[in-house]
Image (cartoon, coloured by chain):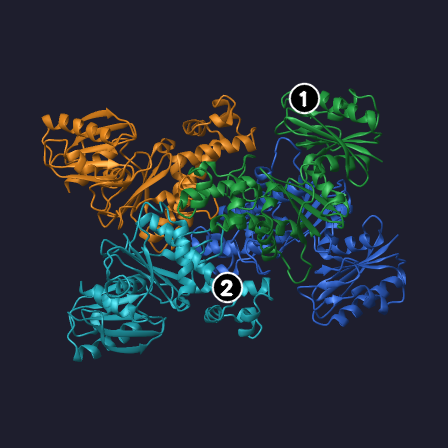
Chain colours: A orange, B cyan, C green, D blue
């Protein structure tokens, strides 16, 4: 059965028809206003209507950044869109002509599910997705099933605390994992290193026009690939934090594979090597259990569409 | 269907017949030698044979402290018993006359399952058990199912890292949760407090005959109940660590209830209050999600028997 | 002998004639431009010339925020003024008509010295000044002498590290003491508390017009004095960090008194109580040594003038 | 003027005549009982009497592990000898025939002073001694003067806190520097590494006869010199902690040189390189101030005798 997946961002909506093998057969996009929830409803309905003219689909999955209600019909709260206890599925349903089932999923869960079904985790039954971007998102799959938690708030991996009284986090707490294991953390560490020791950061500063504040993540990756010692160390620190935190997750869930998504994957082995070393260094009972695989995600930005569609038709 | 549950300790084995409501209908015990695995097999077989004379059972569950093999037929490694890749179910089966199915379960998983089915968690679908004893053990139940992990090593909650470069742990790492959230941590903190500030520890030292090294957990609980300020603070610190760590678990799994087992439960509200405050203080997205319940376990030492029996017959 | 003290801020200069008892007999002010070092020289010279018309002085002390050269004649580097290896004393000397000796002192050292000679530390021989403001500054007095260090960079107490991988600091490092023990830390903690738990921060949010970002230090102090539980806790946390860090300083220097300066002193015992408890809780060898006094500073903004003048005439 | 220096250990006393260049002209030893303070008095007196038969001396310095009274005449408290408010100088004086002045000094201060006057720090005015042994001891010299603190308890560097809620310390606190920067920390880290990852610790385990508990510091140094990766990393971790802590000391005191004493010095550059890198990585205002030298101590076990003698005659 084909299904439609919808990836709802703050200002853009991407909608695709997905086949049973996870391929996107057709795709359309719409622009929206993050603070106008009715506008988002209409944009989704419009795109769905366009695609269903030429494709027969059996289900629609809506991937949204926020806390999805346990019945998977609405969004209780979203940090970047004005949804509050919002019945998203019903709203969209009222605007379209078809009565196929509509379900809402957290966007990180959807992306993780795409990797589980069609990507790096397709051979696994127990997988953890870690999406290392602005923050650190994730998805948890146990025994072949997506774990949503009692109230739909599971897999907020970025807010596990890894350093008591550590870096401040936007969530109001300190020491959250995403403040150490994210693209933002990489950039901030690079900027601070350039203040603490400008000589050592000469190459990064050069790339950033001399200003520590202008250093960006892709520059760090590029400098590291050129062999810059500080940049390599910064990626290694990021990787170490990903790996060490993953070892704590493994203590709880004993997964078969961790899949690392997000832009930092561009650093390749410069990141993945330190992730694996950090994981192994902190893994409890090493030698008495297999060591989980740690692999890069296979899907990019389209993972949300694919995962939402596939979860909807199950 | 009735089932037999076997709780295998280092030197004692407790075996009971468990009915469908989690009640133990009959129970026997045997003494064993921890380093003689054949002796343990025989003791189990002997006890099972005795009980099956008078009780018809449909399954046998063996609860063991160690890494249970994924097929639930053996123990891959145990810290306190000489099992190494040991086919426990087959060994016991060969010594008994009945051919009912035998399964092996991790003992903390079995105890957690008893709480889930017949105890503090019986109304829940998503539960975390935290057994605060010498170490910190646990069990994870997601969507009504026990989570064993890919290789049977899940729910080693005590080895999540909560303080980088923190207290040394017997596992070889530093900063493991159980080094902050266990009866041993309570005792060690009390002993250190008595060295750092003997005046403040006057009551605890009095109970311990004047020697910091002789302070024990039940003394701390007793002193706290009498109103001793230091003892109350020590229990509050223990509770805070339990609660704060639980918030990290909730970020990952969003459970409905945490059940706290182990001897420290005797401290009652002096422990539970700080656990709840620590949990709420660190819970991500407080206000956008319900706050999980935190309750004391209902079962004591017999939880292993009950849980093993119930898991075996499923 | 009377002496002139000059307190050089980024945009304001305060100049006073100080008698032997630390009293300011006359005072004038000038506005300056932080990026125009010649303008600052002229403003100082102008003010000094004005004061010396009516007062006979034997020395001039210039208090400057920055690294003062070991010969106390110039400023090697200043974070907020464009001095780089700048011969400040000679520059000013060339613009005035008197040939009394001119010396340059770090402003925090000058303020600490004023407290040592005429304020809370006047009975002591070994004193640590901690100025808790935007950052955490300080002064160290050992055996009656100001400690400047080999290269004039001593007493940068705010940059002792208290939390590995802790809060980011403007200096480029992580976990600096001033990120936990300063007015800025208080404000940031209050703002984060209001995000993490708005209900608990109701009073602070009310004072700040509903916006966490608008919470300011004096509001926290005011709310605490009204009895607001969160505000009291925030001041207690600030106090604890001051006291615990002070215990580390005491391990190194065993001072007789700590003097706490800066605006947070307005909180009085709500701050000082936790400082003392934190100090005692972490003090090594408590019971085998006296516990240093911890007192609020007696001087306010004029401490820089008084201390600079007094150091100049010694 | 020649002087006698006495180094009082728990069970051994070493006594020497020291000339003005810090050379030991004659030396004798005595065995004592740590719990019999009168016996220690007699042993000192006996040794002093023997040496003064052939050497004219102008002062006697007694170096003792403990808190020395501010008048330098007694020991207020010692961890390993039964001195409590003990008038050591008077007791010894009563047993000898000469009336040269006798002063008591803390043993780490005495050893640091020897380095300052005749060893690695002899060209400096501001020096920090760090003695990395079972614990972490030290001495602080500011402006050419030994810093004893108001109550004789200065330079307890090992009890500065470097990790909140970190490793337990014998002093009753957590996270003391000496629990990370001492020979004991090195050994404990090595032992834990061998538990966490026996494969990686193969060489160390081989040296220790297969038992993690039997790993000792000199083995780590030897393995590191052979090129063993884990051993090199363990020394680097020790060095990093020494260097990072030293940067905190520098924030406070801005010394010219750090002198590293104790047995771990045998590791040479394998230790010193990481110390220097850790120091520079954490030094505040790097680039705006010179970087202090970090050197190994020149004196070994005789530093206590030499320093005590030299301090006595000043």
Near-viewer residue (B282 or B180): B282
Q: Is residue B260 above or below residue C52?
A: below
Same chain assignment for discs 2 and 1? no
- Residue under the image location 76 percent in, 68 percent down: D40
Label 2 lies in what chain? B
- Residue under the image location 48 percent in, 43 percent down: C190
Where's residue C282, x and y in %?
59, 55
Quadrant location, the C terminus of chain A: top left
Q: Residues within 10 Å of mark 1 (few under 14, many from 20)?
A: some
Can residue C123 be seen here?
A: yes
Near-viewer residue (B295 or D134): B295
Marks 2 and 1, how far apart at CA: 59 Å
Can residue C164 be seen here?
A: no
Q: SS for tag 1? A: helix
Q: SS for tag 2? A: helix
Where's residue B246, x and y in %?
37, 54
Near-viewer residue (D98 or B255): B255
Q: Is residue A54 above or below residue B273?
A: above
Where's residue A149, x and y in %?
27, 49
- Label ID, residue B188: 2
- The residue tagged 1 is C37
Label 1 lies in what chain? C
């Amino acid at each position: 059965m084909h299904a439609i997946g919808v990836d709802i961002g703050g200002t853009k909506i991407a909608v695709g028809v997905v086949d049973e093998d996870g391929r996107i057969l057709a795709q359309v996009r719409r622009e929206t206003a993050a603070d106008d929830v009715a506008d988002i409803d209409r944009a989704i309905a419009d795109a769905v209507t366009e695609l269903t003219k030429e494709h027969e689909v059996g289900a629609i999955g809506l991937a949204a950044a926020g806390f999805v209600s346990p019945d998977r019909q609405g969004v209780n709260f979203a940090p970047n869109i004005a949804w509050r206890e919002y019945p998203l599925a019903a709203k969209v349903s009222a605007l379209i002509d078809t009565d196929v089932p509509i379900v809402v999923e957290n966007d990180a869960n959807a992306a993780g599910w795409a990797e589980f079904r069609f990507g790096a985790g397709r051979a696994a039954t127990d997988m953890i997705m870690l999406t290392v971007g602005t923050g650190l998102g994730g998805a948890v799959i146990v025994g072949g099933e997506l774990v949503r938690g009692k109230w739909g708030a599971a897999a907020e991996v970025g807010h596990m605390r890894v350093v008591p009284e550590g870096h401040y986090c936007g969530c109001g707490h300190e020491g959250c994992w995403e403040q150490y294991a994210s693209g933002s953390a990489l950039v901030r560490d690079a900027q601070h290193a350039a203040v603490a020791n400008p000589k050592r950061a000469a190459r990064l500063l050069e790339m950033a026009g001399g200003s520590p504040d202008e250093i960006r993540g892709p520059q760090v990756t590029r400098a590291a690939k050129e062999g810059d010692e500080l940049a390599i160390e910064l990626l290694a620190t990021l990787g170490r934090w990903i790996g060490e935190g993953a070892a704590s997750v493994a203590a709880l869930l004993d997964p078969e594979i961790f899949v690392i998504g997000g832009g930092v994957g561009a650093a390749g082995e410069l990141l993945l090597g330190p992730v694996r070393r950090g994981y192994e260094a902190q893994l409890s009972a090493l030698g008495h259990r297999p060591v989980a695989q740690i692999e890069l995600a296979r899907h990019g930005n389209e993972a949300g569409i694919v995962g939402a569609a596939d979860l909807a038709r199950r």
